[in-house]
Image (cartoon, rainbow, N blue to C red):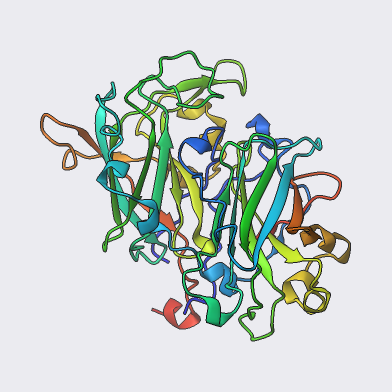
Amino acid sequence: MTTEYVREDADPPLDYPPYRSTALRHPKEPLVYLPHTVTEITGPQLGPARVRGELDSDLTRQHEGEPIGERMTVTGRVLDTEGRPLRGTLVEIWQANSAGRYRHRSDRWPAPLDPNFSGAGRAVTDDDGRYSFTTIKPGPYPWGNHHNAWRPAHIHFSLMGQAFAQRLVTQMYFPGDPLFPFDPIFNSVRDPKARERMIAAFTMDGTQPNWATGYEFDICLRGPEATPFEEAH
Amino acid sequence: MSFHTTPSQTVGPFLSIGLPWPEGEFAVPPDSPGAIRIAMTVSDGAGEPVPDAMIETWQADPEPSETSGFRGFARSGFEAGDGNYEVVTLKPGAVPMPDGRMQAPHVDVSVFARGMLNRCVTRIYFADEDEANASDPVLASVPADRRETLLAQPTDDGYRFDIRLQGPGETVFFAI
């Protein structure tokens, strides 16, 4: 049984002034080291109970009509740092519509809502750790962080993993987005290589003729800390 | 290690589209024997309520013999809108450290919100478990004058636990 998960530090700092809302929402006291005990190396097995059917993973068929926008598939594998697939784990996504508008009462950006798009999906990984969604490509949208601030198009991803220590919420971005240099949330991840791990890859293999463009997005959660014996290999 | 982790990003302001669900805050049905309500608040560095957070809890079963069907997990944040959150669960049993020493009953907590680029992790301990708390190795690693921020206080139907993200009485958060 795993005794400790790796504590790789690719994550952004909680205090990141360019993203203004962090100012009053980050702890100022130092974090206290938490050993990975049985509470941290176990986690809820939510998958099957939270996914009711295939419509949960097809965001283009949740209403009477079809949403407007570029139909696309997003598929990928959920792995750990040892490259092992995480099977049967819950993947939850939410996103703006193709005009960059969220179906949420607090979103005041006056781009049109799409009556045929809710923007939420759920899937459970298969035996290879693979998930798949069909959706439409979200649009970029402005926000109030600074003058002329725009978020690059993104899809929010929530991963339960198999242990409390593996829990991850992230955002998937699209290759070549011209807004990358200007977005403080994307750039809060300080290591450029780590930022690349949040960008999906367009694939012709995943693109289906006369149907949908295809994107591949693998997600890597923390795996067990290697023992000295394993490191010797 | 052959792969590197995908970095965390904020849940943003619109998490309620995708994450909470109406029964999410019930780790057990509220009429279950032994069910307790843990009422929580989240406030920011100005002392203002944080209305757009989401709280997840994960914990051990009450006793090894009662494990059947207990989800152990709750998620609160379904359009609460006022900085108040609650979960209904069972009081956890004591579980060991990796070295075999016993831990006091506790609940692991993740706090997510707009303005938080990663979750903040804390633990709920129970103020009426003096004896177990006194020998808990994790609590012992927390500066003594801050331990109280991890203690849920008894109420009529459960406990109350206030989470202060920053400032006076700042809750102890853990590096996990």
Front position in the image: B20 or A183: B20
Instruction: Report whether A3 appears left or right of A119.
Output: right
Judge by depth and name the residue closer to the eye, A149 or B56. Answer: B56
**Residue A69 drawn at (x, y percent):** 28, 22
Image: B119 above or below A116: below
Whether residue A58 sits left or right of residue A138 in the image: it is left
The one nearer the camera, B151 or B62, is: B62
Tell me the quarter of the picture where residue B50 sits.
Answer: top right
When the figure is inspected, residue B125 is found, relative to residue A176, above or below; the finding is below
Q: Quadrant of the N terminus of chain B?
A: bottom left
Horizontally, is B73 left or right of B135 in the view?
Answer: left
Query: Measured from the top left, where is residue A154 in percent x and y?
Result: 42, 33
Residue extending farthest bottom:
B100
Residue occupying the far left of the picture: A209
Residue A113 position in % (x across, y down): 40, 19
Q: So how many labels did they put on this image?
A: 0
Residue depicted at 66% across the width and 78% down the height: B94
Res. B176 in view: no
> Image check: A76 left or right of B37?
left
Q: Is residue A188 visible?
A: yes
Q: Quadrant of residue B36?
A: bottom right
Residue drawn at the location 51% of the way across and 69% of the way down: A42
Most distant residue in the right direction: B145
Q: Position of residue A224 (x, y in %)?
A: 47, 71
- Which residue occupies the foreground of this view, B161 or A203? B161
Asked if residue B127 is positioned above or below residue B16 in the image, the reply reads: below
The quadrant of the picture occupied by the C terminus of chain B is bottom right
Q: Residue at x 64, y 34 (%)?
A: B81
